[in-house]
Image (cartoon, rainbow, N blue to C red):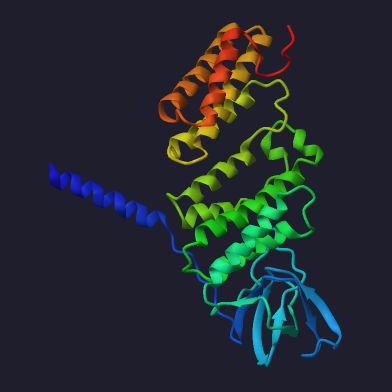
Amino acid sequence: MRNGLLLCSLLSLSAMAVSAQKMPQMTAPKNGTRATLVRLANLYVQPDESADRMAEVTPGRELVIVERNGKWLRVFANTDTQDTRRSDQPEFGGDAETAAPISGWLLDKGIVDVNTPHGDQILFGEADIAEQAASEPNPPPRVAQEARLLYRRLVEMFPQSPWIAEAMYRAADIRWQTQKADAMTLPSAHEKESYLREQMDEDEMKKVEKYFPHTKWAALAAFDLIDNKLCGDWQGSEKCPEKEADYYLKFADDYPDAEVTPSALYKAAWREASAGDMWASDGDQKRADEDRGRAKAIVQRMTDKYPQSAYTVRGTTLVYKVEQGIPVYGSERE
């Protein structure tokens, strides 16, 4: 019996090891040291502040330091490539078909390279500051993009950092939320079928799942990925909320201990209750009762496993409305 349990444990550990794939390492540039900036800087033609300015280099942009001259650094700088889609591969050490970076001189101030002590923490801290600024009303221009790029530079420059999984997820999430906001402005956002809507690029989220499975960040990535499966407008079809509830329930089954699991279950319960309202409106009381019963069962599951969650409290309110005959979807007027 003990041998059997030992074998099962070894097989389980082996499966986890296989599922966690090693991240590919970037090739170091042959002509210098990879670096980035945590400040806005001018790129000069010569190592002189009175020389002509070639461009501005924003925080998080890629640099390769090729020469040092006192307080000056000669660099190759990526100043304008938009790091937002699948094609946004690193400029240095990759074979992406993108414009070559330009060469110039920067003051050696606010530059983090692969040899900077605590460089990963510096980049993560600056990225976190920028991300928080982006969440404020009327944020500075480019600040969300700068946060994303700083997280990406951490991943590329410090592959052994303990912050790498979170940085990879945060970079992916900033892009995901930006694309999601853009997609919601398009006419296709109101299409019922998900495949008819503008889809968010899943590449980076799937890499988080691939390289960091069984982690908090993989769970958050999986939760975000549900967005691409949701209907736009339900257009009176009960299948939409029922199908969406199934997606959230599967997530809860796969990630029972994730911090967003109570939210996923509440979303599932609300959709089942909404489908119940829709069936009742269509005159099918049997189907209405079935979906409302599923909503109550989901909330009971939340009460049993997540009694302290605010989403469980919301679920209690949801059940109360269902039992009182108060619609949770559509008009509440009698």
Query: Can you say whether 272 is above or below 146 in the image?
Result: above
Q: How many marks?
A: 0
The residue shown at (13%, 41%) is 1
The residue shown at (56%, 14%) is 320
Residue 86 shows up from this direction: no
Q: Quadrant of residue 150?
A: bottom right
Query: Can you say whether 75 is above or below 99 in the image?
Result: below
**Farthest residue, direction bottom:** 69
Q: Quadrant of residue 56?
A: bottom right
The residue shown at (67%, 64%) is 88
Residue 19, percent from left and from top = 40, 54
Residue closest to the eye, 243 or 311: 311
Residue 141 as seen in the image, left or right of residue 7: right
Residue 109, percent from left and from top = 68, 79
Residue 324 shows up from this direction: yes
The residue shown at (68%, 39%) is 195
Residue 82, percent from left and from top = 74, 64
Location of the C terminus (image quadrant): top right
Residue 46 as seen in the image, left or right of residue 297: right
Residue 85 as seen in the image, left or right of residue 311: right
Residue 215, percent from left and from top = 45, 50
Query: Can you say whether 23 is above or below 71 in the image?
Result: above
Residue closest to the eye, 59 or 70: 70
Residue closest to the eye, 114 or 184: 114
